[in-house]
Amino acid sequence: MKNLFILNEQPYGGERSYNALRLAVSLGKSADQKVRVFLMADAAACGLKNQKTPQGYYNIEHMLKLVTRQGGEISVCGSCMDARGISEEMLTEGARRGTLAILTEWTAWADKVLVF
């Protein structure tokens, strides 16, 4: 099954991005599941590298790396990056600048689209 996760919420202060990535990582453990994550709106900040979180708190950057280690793909909306002053050099390993065309392609590819 091919799964597309579209995240819209900031990495911290809410739990939608965290819960979406928990599910993405869980699905990614199964060989028959493919996972792609598209970060847009305030979720563009989820793709930043060198996130520092207090001990005991979840780290969104670490969760994204788990997705890519499992063979998943991460794309960050380029317009959303620009609006927030995020450059490609600021993105975590495995995340790449995306476009609406990529989101369109990924949506057509997916068997399931989950929006958080």
Image: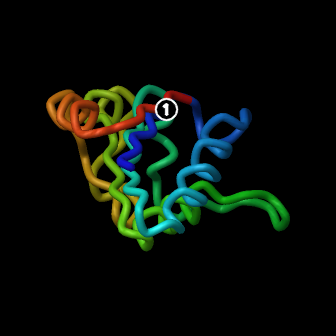
Q: Nearer the viewer, residue 74 or 34?
A: 34
Question: What secondary structure is marked by label 1?
Answer: strand
Q: Nearer the viewer, residue 9 or 53?
A: 9
Circle count: 1
Residue at 53% of width from left, 52% of height from top? 24
Residue at 44% of width from left, 34% of height from top? 6
In the displayed structure image, the side of residue 47 where residue 58 appears, left or right: right
- In the rendered image, residue 28, in percent from the top left (x then y), is placed at 49, 62
- In the rendered image, residue 17, in percent from the top left (x then y), is placed at 60, 40
Q: Quadrant of the C terminus?
A: top right
Tag 1 residue:
114
Extreme residue toward the right, this view:
56
Q: Amino acid at mark 1?
A: Leu
Image position of 112 with respect to 55: above or below: above
Image position of 53 with respect to 111: above or below: below
> How busy is the neighbourhood of tag 1: few (under 14 within 10 Å), some, or many (20 plus)?
few
Q: Nearer the viewer, residue 115 or 34?
A: 34
- In the rendered image, residue 113, in percent from the top left (x then y), is placed at 42, 32
Residue at 22% of width from left, 31% of height from top? 108
Display colour scheme: rainbow
Residue at 33% of width from left, 56% of height from top? 73
- In the rendered image, residue 32, in percent from the top left (x then y), is placed at 41, 62
